[in-house]
């Protein structure tokens, strides 16, 4: 039996079990995973097997309709159930979310779209899945279902994309806020927008509230900053964060930073942030996937992804970030276009020579000095090592 089909059957069983217990959110998550597995199965199945897969998807969709009380999904929409559910939920965004310092995203990505980072994904999955799976047990034992997480690591290594994949994996809306943009607001508006971001996430619960560049908002220097604006902003944010946890909220706060050593220690204490996770430069599997994504839709000839992975491995402590790999792909494609223009031809294939020239131009962006800083922070704070 196909592995994908087995996964679909298992997820369907888990969804049924959650539905019987009245946990609609967990049931929806498992049903969506089941449909995702059936999609994968259908791609390599014969015509008879595809009919079976489609019939199972129709049954799952019918159950999902009963759970959500939404309008009937029409015939032929069975392959778009996750997108339909995301659209239905997106129409319910509270007005206050539009007044917050960020935006709400119903991510279409999941962990299968993210190569590598297996340990990071495991930690994040555990942080969200248990509260969703056992809400009554968390309530009975007095365990706050909300967990604060801090992601730290070099710039350009996919912290924001990681959160989007996490949100999509569990079918949760993500309220995404940039601390830098919050601070650009008019005097008095920053703390109000920060408050509305938390309110928005609570109204969308279960949800994820993600604040990028948290060091800009809650910096170590802000403790000695004499301006009333920074003091009010810091106090308001921490007050909202303290009130964000709760037995029934089932929402999670995630912050990200490239400069963890500059964060106000008031944020990194039990009850506010309980997990601190390092997100480093992509490993071999992740770099290979980034190269493949970067070349999607392009004609290639003689391109060996394994060779590209080898050519971009760490040397002397210097590593390529995901953003740097993406830039290599961009330069490679541009060089092909210039070559086409020079030769007066079209649709030239990308070759290893094009890549070698691009890799020579783009240097690794993660330095040994960065690693030392992160190692020092990780020794006393992080849930994971940086190597």
Image (spheres, rainbow, N blue to C red):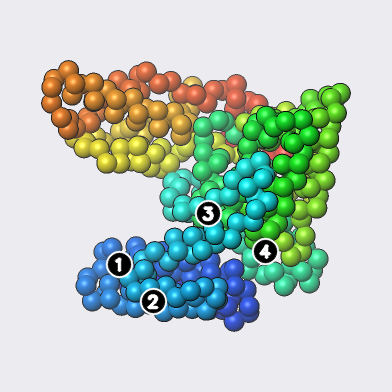
> What is the spatial separation of the Cα atoms under label 4 and label 2, in whole angstroms?
29 Å
Secondary structure of the residue carrying tag 1 is helix
Which residue is under mark 2? 58
Badge nearest the viewer, 3 or 4: 3
Q: Mark 4 points at which residue?
A: 131
Q: How far apart are marks 3 and 1 (CA)?
A: 25 Å
Pinpoint residue 58: horizontal percent, then vertical percent: 39, 76
Closer to the chain start, of discs 3 and 1, is: 1
- Asked if the residues shown at circle 3 and circle 4 are in contact, with their CB atoms under 8 angstroms apart, the answer is no
Label 1 near label 3: C-beta < 8 Å? no
Residue 39 occupies quadrant: bottom left
Using the image, determine if residue 232 lies above or below residue 176.
above
Where is mark 3, residue-wise?
A: 106
Q: Quadrant of the C terminus?
A: top right
Residue 69 x %, y %: 55, 76
Residue beneath the point at 62% across and 42% down: 102
In the picture, which quadrant includes the N terminus? Answer: bottom left
Disc nearer the start of the sequence (3/4): 3
Q: Which of 150 and 65 is in front in this view?
A: 65
């Amino acid at each position: 039996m196909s592995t994908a089909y087995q996964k679909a059957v298992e997820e369907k069983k888990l969804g049924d079990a959650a539905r019987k217990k009245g946990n609609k959110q967990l049931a929806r998550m498992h049903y969506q995973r089941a449909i995702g597995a059936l999609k994968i199965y259908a791609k390599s199945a014969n015509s008879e097997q595809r009919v079976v897969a489609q019939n199972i998807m129709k049954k799952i969709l019918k159950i999902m309709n009963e759970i959500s009380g939404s309008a009937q999904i029409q015939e032929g929409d069975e392959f778009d159930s996750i997108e339909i559910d995301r659209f239905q939920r997106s129409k319910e965004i509270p007005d206050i979310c539009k007044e917050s310092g960020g935006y709400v995203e119903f991510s279409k990505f999941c962990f299968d779209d993210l190569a590598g980072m297996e340990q990071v994904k495991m930690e994040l999955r555990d942080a969200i899945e248990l509260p969703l799976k056992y809400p009554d047990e968390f309530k009975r034992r007095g365990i706050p279902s909300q967990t604060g997480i801090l992601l730290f690591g070099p710039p350009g290594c996919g912290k924001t994309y990681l959160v989007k994949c996490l949100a999509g994996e569990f079918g949760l809306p993500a309220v995404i806020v940039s601390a830098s943009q919050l601070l650009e607001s008019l005097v008095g508006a920053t703390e109000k927008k920060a408050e509305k971001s938390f309110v928005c996430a609570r109204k969308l619960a279960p949800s994820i509230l993600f604040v990028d560049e948290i060091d800009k908002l809650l910096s170590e220097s802000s403790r000695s900053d004499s301006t009333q604006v920074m003091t009010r902003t810091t106090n308001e944010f921490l007050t909202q964060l303290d009130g964000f946890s709760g037995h029934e909220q089932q929402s999670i706060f995630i912050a990200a930073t490239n400069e963890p050593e500059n964060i106000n220690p008031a944020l990194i204490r039990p009850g506010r942030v309980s997990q601190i996770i390092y997100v480093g430069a992509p490993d071999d599997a992740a770099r290979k996937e980034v190269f493949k994504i970067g070349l999607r839709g392009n004609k290639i000839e003689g391109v060996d992804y394994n060779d590209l992975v080898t050519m971009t491995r760490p040397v002397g402590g210097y590593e390529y970030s995901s953003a740097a790999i993406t830039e290599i792909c961009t330069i490679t494609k541009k060089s092909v276009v210039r070559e086409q223009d020079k030769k007066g031809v079209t649709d030239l294939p990308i070759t290893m020579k094009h890549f070698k020239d691009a890799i020579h131009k783009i240097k690794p962006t993660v330095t040994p000095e960065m690693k030392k800083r992160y190692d020092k922070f990780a020794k006393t704070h992080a849930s994971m090592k940086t190597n």
